Every structure is written in structure tokens, then in C-alpha cells.
Amino acid sequence: MNKETPEVLISEEEIQARVLALAAEISSDYRDADELVMVGVLKGSFIFLADLSRRLSIPRTIEFIAVSSYGNGSISSGAVRLVMDVRGNIEGKHVLIVEDIVDTGHTIKYLTGMMKSHRPASVKTAALVRKAESAEVDVTIDYLGFDIGDEWVVGYGLDFAEQYRTLPYIGFVKPTD
Ligand code: 5GP
């Protein structure tokens, strides 16, 4: 286990301010919707989803999905598999996919397609961070926290070998694999 304290890239204060702003934007955009179904992508989105959902001023429900990428380590192989689908019926509802981080874009693109197969009223995406330079596929992130460079980040839900998820800030460590 890596016991280093990661260096701060995005501070707790910056994250909280951005989450508040995103929540205000989402609340305004969906003000006329009966319900917004927030679909968190496990595990990395759990803290972002918890903070974002509690700052909304509109009716919302929470679902989770889980995916696994083929391949391992910190290199995305581009192939994504759904390992847990939503439990509730999302047909005819407004869906917001909540992701921790968008790297190549393969995961969010796959998930958007998956959600659309449930025939919801709409599907939009929120991501806390995006590695803009790493994009391999063209995906729209409707609600984006921050753009960052191509480095492995941890904290605020994000891990490195399951460590660091509960850090209140986003930081970086050097991958060893
Ligand atoms: P994509 O399919 O966009 O290439 O990859 C998205 C997934 O890769 C994220 O959901 C996350 O699980 C993982 N990922 C990509 N970059 C990072 C990173 O810097 N830190 C962590 N913890 N996960 C990452």
C-alpha cells in the first residue's frame, strides 16, 4: 500500500464551490421535471453523488450502476462491461449519469447508450473531472467540474489500488505499474 500523502491538485474548498454551482445549474435546468434520477457509477462517484444530490433543490432519486473495464492497471482498454444495472424503472424519466472522472470517454459513452436502452425521457451526464487531452471518443459532459491534465488522480471518491477514496480533495500520486 502506498502511504504517501497525495499532493493537492483541487482543494476541498474549490470542489465544494464547484459542486454548489453545478447543483444550482442542474436544479434550474430540471425545475419543471417531476423527478431527476441520478445514476452514480460505482465506486468512484459515491462522494460526488452524495454531495451533488444533497445540494439540489428539485425532486431526485438515486440509482447506482457498476462497470468493469477489460484490462487492468491504470490503462483504459476501451472495452466496458456492465456488472450492475439500475434496479428501479427509469423508462420515461429524466436520467443524469454521475461519473467521477472521464478519461478516454469510452465508459461514459457506453453508459449513455446503456441508459438510453431503458427508454428514459432524457439522458445527461455529469462528471467531476475530465482529462481533456486523453479523449478518444467524442462525448458531451453536460455538467463538468474541472478539466485536468493526464495524470492519475485520487481522492473525493477516486482511488489508487482502493486507497485514498475518502480524501476530501483531489490529489495525485505516481502510479507504480
Ligand atoms: P474512460 O473510459 O473514460 O477511459 O475511463 C473512465 C474510468 O477510468 C473512470 O471511471 C475511472 O474508473 C478510471 N480512471 C481514469 N483516470 C483515472 C484517474 O486518474 N484516477 C482514478 N482513480 N481513476 C481513473
Image (cartoon, rainbow, N blue to C red):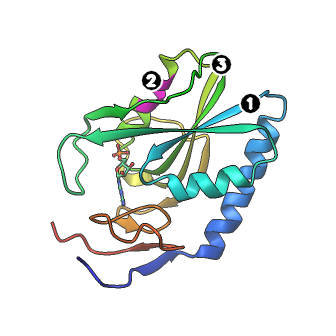
| Secondary element type, mark 2 | helix
Any part of residue 145 in sight: no
| Residue at numbered disc 2 | 113
Question: Residue 140: where, in percent of width, then height?
Answer: 53, 36
- Pick whichever, 124 or 35, lies toward us: 35
Distance from the alpha carbon under mark 2 to that under mark 1: 21 Å
Q: Is residue 6 above or below residue 155?
A: below
* Residue 78 falls left or right of residue 166: left
Q: Is residue 15 above or below residue 63?
A: below
The answer to if 165 sits in the magenta stretch is no
Badge 2 or badge 1: first in the primary sequence: 1
- Pick whichever, 25 or 148, lies toward us: 25
Return the residue found at the far bottom: 4
| Magenta stretch, residue numbers | 111-115
Residue 121: mark in rendering: 3
Give the residue type that dot 3 points to.
Answer: Ala
| Secondary element type, mark 3 | loop
* Residue 176 falls left or right of residue 124: left
Q: Tell me the quarter of the picture where residue 62 sits.
A: top right
| Secondary element type, mark 1 | loop
| Residue at numbered disc 1 | 35
Q: Is residue 72 above or below residue 5?
A: above
Circle 2: is it few (<14), some (14-19), or many (20+) Cα within 10 Å?
Answer: few
Q: Are marks 1 and 3 in contact (CB under 8 Å)?
A: no
Q: Tell me the quarter of the picture where residue 13 sits.
A: bottom right
Q: Quadrant of the N terminus?
A: bottom left
Question: Residue 105: where, in percent of width, then height?
Answer: 39, 41
The residue lying at 27 percent from left, 74 percent from top is: 174
Give the residue type that dot 2 points to.
Answer: Gly
Front label number (2 vs 1): 1
Residue 151: mark in rendering: none
The residue lying at 18 percent from left, 71 percent from top is: 176
